[in-house]
Image: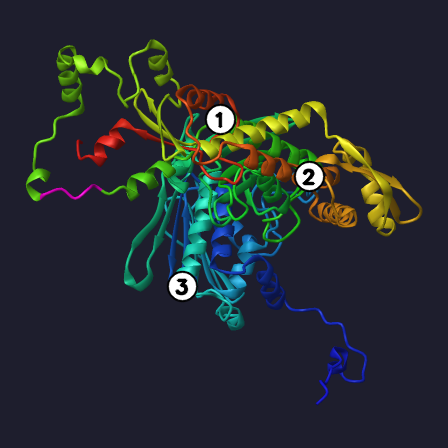
Amino acid sequence: MAQEHTNIGASFGSSRPVIRQLDEAAVNRIAAGEVVERPASAVKELVENALDAGAGRIEVVIGDGGRSLIRVSDDGCGMTAEDLPLALSRHATSKIDGSDLMNIHTFGFRGEALPALAAVGRLSITSRAAGEPAAQITMTGGRGGGLRPAALSGGTVVELRDLFFATPARLKFLRSDRTEAMAVTDVVKRLAMAEPQVTFILRDTSDGQDRLVFRADAENGPEALKRRLAGVLGRDFAANSVEIEALRDGIRLTGHAALPTYSRGAAVSQHLFVNGRPVRDKLLIGALRAAYTDLMARDRHPAAALFIWLDPQEVDVNVHPAKAEVRFREAGLVRGLVISALRHALAAAGHRTSSTVADGLLGAARPLAYPPGLQQAARPSWGALRESAAAQAPGFAEMAAPSARPDTGDNARRADERLPLGAARTMLHGTYILAQTDDGLVIVDAHAAHERLTYERLKRQMADNGVPAQALLIPEIVTLGHTAADRVLAVADDLARLGLTIEPFGPGTVVVRETPALLGQLDVQSLVRDIADALSESEGDGSAADGAATGLVGRRLDALLSRIACHTSVRAGRQLQTDEMNALLREMEATPNSGQCNHGRPTSISLGLTDIERLFART
């Protein structure tokens, strides 16, 4: 049976369709579909209004995931009785005058949120400005708007009940109450990170209970952001992240980025802000991912909270009604700043690995099973053992004889113990170096560490000496089409520095005369087409075209260097001498990114003396 195709225009009949002016209620419901997608969207708009009002304390109460109740209370500047009806009119706002839509200094500016919420739910606003009486206005499904006196000490309380009751079809697209509540929590936490000087409280009153979901008290001082991030993202993130501070051409980047070994299985811990506004921007997400290239496995994702500050005239936040997307005037500059600042900070972290790696080791450790009577025996403290060893040492002449225990008496070894990775004591199973530090021990995967050291050395050599090119015996002709060929030729000079020489060869066609010698035999046609595709995608997301092209070739070169480093590094099973082990430790301390191998695995694990004592129940 043939599928029947219906002409949409035929639904109007044979007569000419008539253009009608939609009534205000229909217009508001249509607008609500863009601004308010789910309860979390409503919470975002209301909390941002509270922040724009100068609130120092914001409390959010939800019920049934936000379906039945959303209440946002703040101590901001409030509104007068005359302001309330105007606040519920579309495109009425106190934040801009309409003369310059590029000079935005506030979260909101469209004047759409409140009338959109009033159109799809039961909205009540109670507010009081300083020196004015409190007033309340209510609207149901876009109708109403009557004013009456109210009791309120100051600020504003916005209460939204029965969200989407006026548009029942939207209710079918909402997820479970738990999922919607989690989305609300995520929105509140993101805004809490953006404004550390404000107190945020989130409560859930579902099922007749009053449960505190999230609270972040106001932070002040130079460490305010770090303390707020620790409170929102957890102390593990704060302990395993590096501070980011960079400035270039009037664009400032601040925040914290986690160590590569503190990675995640999904991109749920990436928080990006532009002029304090939480955004989900493809350009910034791509730059964050690029900064961690060759520092973590492909299926892992970095964690970060990054804040970009720039002149409002240099960024367009008026891209989408939800204001979660932005467009930069100098996209390549912003992308370059993010990548270079992150790489510099991560390189400065050197051999550091996430403390959660050691925590995992401690969690996996199991004490040996002792006879019941022996388990109850008294265990001397670490200090008592040291004193006992010092008192008995002179009486043991056999200690001077050769033994399997490494000598710990020389001054050089003691000096090494004060270094971050300590002094090598022995090698276990031909793979793991055991080193002693001043306050614990370090276990190093010799192969993984040497792999990273070799890789970084190869990259430095390539950067210093350039990429050698090999001339093709028969130049490869690639037909791309006019637009794609122009894109590739525009970055030909950058590609030449990576050993890939491309020249024009007629309309829509290029010829490849040289390729990077390190890559050996390769599919030139596929490589050039991949470059053209990368350039096309970079134009779509606003990233720099030359960076996309050279990045693709550079990634292939880096992948090759990584394979070379892997195959030429210390193999598992080879027993290193003490001097070799110590030399490896010292080079790790001096080499950027040595905390993880080329595949993202940690190269070392540090255990403090207190951790070891805890394993043996000494604390």
Residue 145 percent location from the top left of the image:
51, 61
Task: Please give left or right for residue 91 compared with residue 575 in the image.
Answer: right
Tag 1: amino acid = Gly
User: Closer to the N terminus: mark 2 or mark 3?
Assistant: 3
For the point 30% across and 22% down, the residue is 439
Tag 2: amino acid = Gly
Foreground residue among 80 and 590:
590
Foreground residue among 18 and 222:
222
Foreground residue among 397 and 332:
397
Residue 259 percent location from the top left of the image:
47, 35
| Observer able to see residue 136 | no
Could you say which quadrant of the image residue 18 lies in?
bottom right
Task: Please give left or right for residue 278 compared with residue 424 in the image.
Answer: right
Q: Give the crowd class for mark 1: few <14, some 14-19, many >=20 residues within 10 Å.
A: some
Residue 310 percent location from the top left of the image:
63, 33
Foreground residue among 334 and 192:
334
Residue 369 magenta-drawn? yes
User: Closer to the N terminus: mark 1 or mark 2?
Assistant: 1
Tag 3: amino acid = Asp
Q: Secondary structure at mark 1?
A: loop
Residue 68 percent location from the top left of the image:
40, 64
Which label belongs to residue 177? 3
User: Closer to the N terminus: mark 1 or mark 3?
Assistant: 3
Residue under label 1: 350
- From the image, which quarter does the N terminus lie in? bottom right
Q: Give the crowd class for mark 2: few <14, some 14-19, many >=20 residues within 10 Å.
A: some
Could you say which quadrant of the image residue 284 lies in?
top right
Q: Give the crowd class for mark 3: few <14, some 14-19, many >=20 residues within 10 Å.
A: some
Seen as rendered, the residue at the extreme left is 373
Residue range corresponding to the magenta coloring? 367-371
Whether residue 175 is situated above or below residue 430 in the rendered picture = below
Which label belongs to residue 551? 2
